[in-house]
Image (cartoon, rainbow, N blue to C red):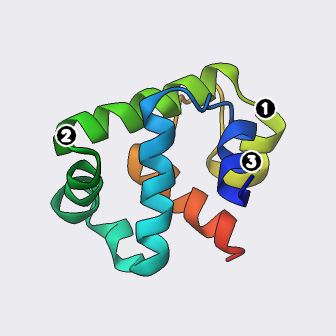
Amino acid sequence: MSDATNYFLRMGIPDFIVGFDFLMDAMELANNDVTLLRKLTKELYPQIAEKNGTTWQHVERGIRFAIETAWDRGDDDFHEKVFGYSYSRTRGRPSNGEFISRSYHYLAGK
């Protein structure tokens, strides 16, 4: 298993939901062009959608659902380790952009 696979499973995202695959694609694309982390709806989501034969809106929703699932099922201690001061169960889940960016930087060791 790849580091990203283990990471998303530990976050609490099951590998059978479509958002898991979209997040894996996001990590791969960001690894090739980190500027995509600042261009979610204009470039990152459309590239993932094209790869998967769907719409960018479906990609956005799939990722949002994956993050909601992670916040319901995941390891709170691990969430706190990755998200630090911004993590709070009472404050709710992070935005798609924050989750993707923090995930990328955690996996890249930055």
Quadrant housing the C terminus: bottom right
In primary-sequence order, the first of circles 1 and 3 is: 3
For the question of whether residue 90 can be seen, the reply is no
**Residue 19 or residue 38, whichever sits in front:** 19
Where 77 falls versus 39 (above or below)?
A: above
Where 70 falls versus 23 (above or below)?
A: above
Label 2: state its secondary structure: loop
Does residue 10 appear to the left or right of 95 in the view shown?
Answer: right
Mark 2 Cα-neighbour bin, 10 Å: few <14, some 14–19, many ≥20: few
Mark 3 Cα-neighbour bin, 10 Å: few <14, some 14–19, many ≥20: few
**Residue 106 or residue 22, whichever sits in front:** 22
The residue indicated by pointer 1 is 75
Check residue 54 in the rendering and tell me which mark sits there, or answer none: 2
Q: Position of residue 83 (x, y in %)?
A: 66, 51
The amino acid type, in three-letter code, at marker 2 is: Thr
**Which residue does the image show at 56% across and 30% down from the upper left?**
91
Where 10 falls versus 31 (above or below)?
A: above
Check residue 6 in the rendering and tell me which mark sits there, or answer none: 3
Does residue 69 appear to the left or right of 61 in the view shown?
Answer: right
Q: Are marks 2 and 3 in contact (CB under 8 Å)?
A: no
Q: Position of residue 74 (x, y in %)?
A: 71, 28
Label 3: state its secondary structure: helix
Query: In the figure, residue 16 lies in which quadrant?
Result: top right
Most extreme residue toward the top is 72
**Which residue does the image show at 50% across and 62% down from the upper left?**
27
Mark 1 to mark 3: distance in Å? Answer: 13 Å
Query: In the figure, residue 73 lies in which quadrant?
Result: top right
